[in-house]
Image (cartoon, coloured by chain):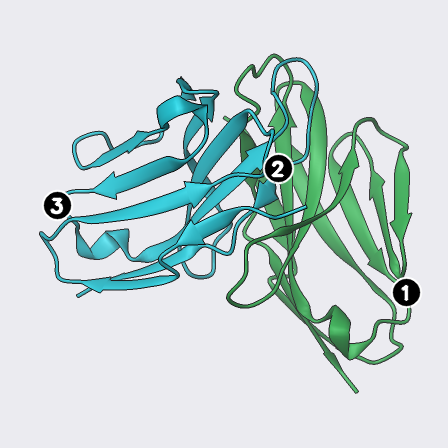
């Protein structure tokens, strides 16, 4: 079974530029998550989709971050404009359909973003 | 607000020297407590889910236990390949979003 795919793996941009990350979840997984992991810290949830609807985006800085999941499969996370403090690893994860059951989340390799 | 605190932040062990990692949590109604392993440059890899106090799960040299306030990850006779960051996360009951709240992790280094 193929895992969660993410691209690019690394990205370096200057502050105020824009950047986009792509994620392809495990086949059949209805739920997709984007996390931000700052160096030395645990991952922090940014947004969760179930199929192509947003379930939780309470921690997403909506003035600069946006995300979409078209057709309930792939997802894109965008930052515009980027700030220095956005330097982090952006992790995508997927799980079986959420709800009352607690299913483990499977993570992709992440995209390491450096903002200079 | 859910809180997860892991200790120690870093742990150095000699190969074969058993030890435990601690995860203290505060959550209003625990649905599940998750342990993940993260290698440098990679995403977290799922290890265990624990659901209720008293539950234990094992995988190779790892054993996870759960109380009402803490979880422990016991590592028996570790090998250098066990070196990684171990992350603990909680999921709240009545959380339709299934959000995980992670701790800061324990960085484990096992020397041969």
Q: Secondary structure at mark 3?
A: loop
Q: Are marks 1 and 3 in contact (CB under 8 Å)?
A: no
Residue shown at 17% from the left, 66% from the top? A116
* Distance CA(mark 1)–CA(mark 2): 26 Å
**Does residue B54 sit above or below A85 in this rendering?**
above
Measured Cα–Cα span from mark 1 to mark 3: 48 Å
Q: Earlier in the sequence, mark 2 or mark 3?
A: 3
Query: Closer to the camera, B68 or A63?
Result: A63
Count up the numbered dots.
Answer: 3
Q: Which residue is mark 2?
A: A105
Q: A110 above or below A60?
A: below
Q: Which residue is mark 3?
A: A81
Chain identifier, colour green: B
**Is residue A57 at least partly visible in the picture?**
no
Pointers 2 and 3 in contact (C-beta within 8 Å): no
Q: CA–CA distance between discs 2 and 3?
A: 29 Å
* Label 1 sits on residue: B76
In the picture, measured across the screen, residue A88 lies left or right of residue A48, that is: left
Residue B11 location (% of width, % of height): 68, 70
What hue represents chain A? cyan
The picture places residue A27, in percent across and down from the top left corner, at: 59, 35
Q: Are marks 1 and 3 on the same chain?
A: no
Picture quadrant where residue A23 is located: top left
- Residue A15, x across and y down, in percent: 12, 57
| Viewer-side label of 1, 3 | 3
Q: Nearer the viewer, residue B3 or A112?
A: A112
Label 2: few (<14), some (14–19) or many (≥20) C-alpha neighbours in 10 Å: many
Q: Residue at x 62, y 48 (%)?
A: A2
């Amino acid at each position: 079974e193929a895992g969660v795919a993410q691209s690019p793996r690394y990205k370096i941009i200057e502050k105020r530029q824009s950047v986009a990350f792509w994620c392809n979840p495990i086949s059949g997984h209805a739920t997709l998550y984007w996390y931000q992991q700052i160096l030395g810290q645990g991952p922090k949830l940014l947004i969760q989709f179930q199929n192509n609807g947003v379930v939780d985006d309470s921690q997403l800085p909506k003035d600069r971050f946006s995300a979409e999941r078209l057709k309930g499969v792939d997802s894109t996370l965008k930052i515009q404009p980027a700030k220095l403090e956005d330097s982090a690893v952006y992790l995508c994860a997927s799980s079986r359909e959420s709800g009352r059951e607690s299913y483990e989340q499977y993570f992709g390799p992440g995209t390491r973003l450096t903002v200079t | 607000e859910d809180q997860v605190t892991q200790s120690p932040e870093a742990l150095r062990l000699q190969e074969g020297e058993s030890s435990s990692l601690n995860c203290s949590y505060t959550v209003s109604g625990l649905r599940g407590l998750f342990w993940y392993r993260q290698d440098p440059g990679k995403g977290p890899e799922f290890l265990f889910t624990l659901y209720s106090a008293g539950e234990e799960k094992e995988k190779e040299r790892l054993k996870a236990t759960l109380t009402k306030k803490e979880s422990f990850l016991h590592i028996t006779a570790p090998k250098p390949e066990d070196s990684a960051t171990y992350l603990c996360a909680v999921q709240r009951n009545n959380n339709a979003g299934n959000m995980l709240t992670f701790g800061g992790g324990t960085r484990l280094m096992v020397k041969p």
